[in-house]
Image (tube, rainbow, N blue to C red):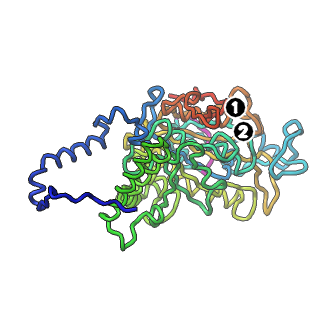
Amino acid sequence: MSINMPQTDTVQRLLRREFLHQTGLGLGSIALSSLMADDGLLAGDAAATPAVLNPLAPRLPHFAGQARSVIQLFMAGGPSQLDLFDYKPALQKLDGQPIPDSYVKGKRFAFVTGVPKCLGTVRKFSRHGECGAEISELLPHIAGIADKITIVRTMHTENFNHGPAKLLAQTGSALFGRPTIGSWVLYGLGSESHNLPGFVVLTSGPRGPRGGSYLWSNGFLSSVYQGVPLRSKGDPILNLANPHSVQSDQQRRVLDAVRDLNTVRLETTGDQEIAARIASYEMAYRMQSSAPELTDLSQESQQTLDSYGAKPGEASFANNCLLARRLVERGVRFITLFHTDWDHHGNKGTDLQEGIERTCREVDQSCAALISDLQDRGLLDETLVVWGGEFGRTPVGEQRDVIGRDHHIDAYSVWLAGGGIQGGQTLGETDELGFYAQDRKQSFAIHDLQATILHCLGLDHRKLTYRFQGRDFRLTDVAGEVIQKALS
């Protein structure tokens, strides 16, 4: 279909100089309007809804939350809390002995069979900071920020398989098809970033996390809320740059035409997926310049690079931590960093000796540097940082190449810092063997952690809902209580 402009005798050709001379004031008004719109100072069309104008426009929270952004440091595979944050002298004494039947009667494991034996740790623990947090020698840098973090030792989850457990941690359900927490946050608050996606995903480690793109999916929410993976090495997004044969002005004309056609269709149908499509095309266009600038870590000082252990041009967790800080500075709402290889069963390379030492070295320095850097730049009070995996590791051993630990869902450790969190405390105590929470009232579920993250952002997890297939869904399903003792 072609569109022909009407030809009339009244059409006059103006020289470029005459056009600029006659419309100078108008061009100035257009420029001013654009700047005011970027800063949220321009009144919109009263008849148009914010979702039509911009599906990612910032929205007010339910109440005044302290955090404006979230950085989720997801340790995919299940870090061993017993070798990192939860020292158990009684487990040391029983090392190699069968665990009392009262702990495991009727208990199912992912891989352990027969009569499991207690497995102590070979790691030294010591107390750190004014709070006296007990942290392993494997994490010396995180130990150095002990007064800035809150350690929760009694998290529990529902599934001991990696894929479903990751889905539960990210979506509140072990089933496929639900929105992830980053998508829920974007749906509730929008984004303050104009030139970058509001929900960004960064991955590192020898492989991607089990569960793949479902871990940053928008589920049944509009596709505009989906997480966008960025690469820390090479092009930030594949195929983002124009082919050499396509000029920028050509691309802009095509996008304008597509936007106009989509807008007509949107006005006719009211389908918000069309609004999402318009927004995604425009975001991709802006990212052609903003994304390469974002990932150019050579702009950072050598001191900053050294503090993270980051090296421009490489793909690493350290680089991703530094990118996360840069994303927060640019108004991105939710950033998830997946780092794999925490599945320390005892196979060669994924054991409790060299395996866990290597993985800890890959994350320890940069995690601590991220917290300190955010604080130095005045961003920590408004940025919530959450560290942890989908579950922990068993207090009993699993024999493979060498002895390792199986998946453990009943009590494991996470830590939080920044916006809305009271640092310098440890919440929850496990029993003397580290198997269960000592006090079931201080045992915290995944939905509790999710409710707490939303609370720090000013969102009531019970009110953040979306109607789909005849019912109201929420991230925390029908459960979840805010972990009040973690809050500042």
Q: Amino acid at mark 1?
A: Ser
- Give the residue displayed 44% in from the left and 52% down from the top: 280
Q: Does residue 146 sit above or below 443 in this rendering?
A: below
* Above-or-below relation of 193 to 477: below
Q: Is residue 48 left or right of residue 102?
A: left
Mark 1 burial class by Cα count in 10 Å: few <14, some 14-19, many 20+: many
To which residue does mark 1 refer?
A: 443
- Say whether residue 214 is left or right of residue 249: right
The answer to whether any part of residue 44 appears in the image is yes
Instruction: Write the residue at 70% across / 45% down.
Output: 175
Residue 158 sits in quarter: top right
Q: Give yes or no for contact between labels 1 and 2 (Cβ–Cβ under 8 Å).
A: yes
Q: Is residue 17 in the magenta section?
A: no
Measured as percent of width and height from the top left, residue 428 is found at: 66, 31
Of the pair 269 and 256, the residue shown nearer to us: 269
SS at badge 2: loop
Marking on residue 411: 2
Is 136 within the magenta? yes
Query: Whole-percent x and y of residue 118?
Result: 82, 46
Say whether residue 178 is left or right of residue 283. right
Secondary structure under badge 1?
A: loop
Q: Which residues are magenta?
A: 130-138
Q: Amino acid at mark 2?
A: Ala
Residue at image point 36% right, 73% down: 245
- Specify which label sits upstream in the sequence, 1 or 2: 2
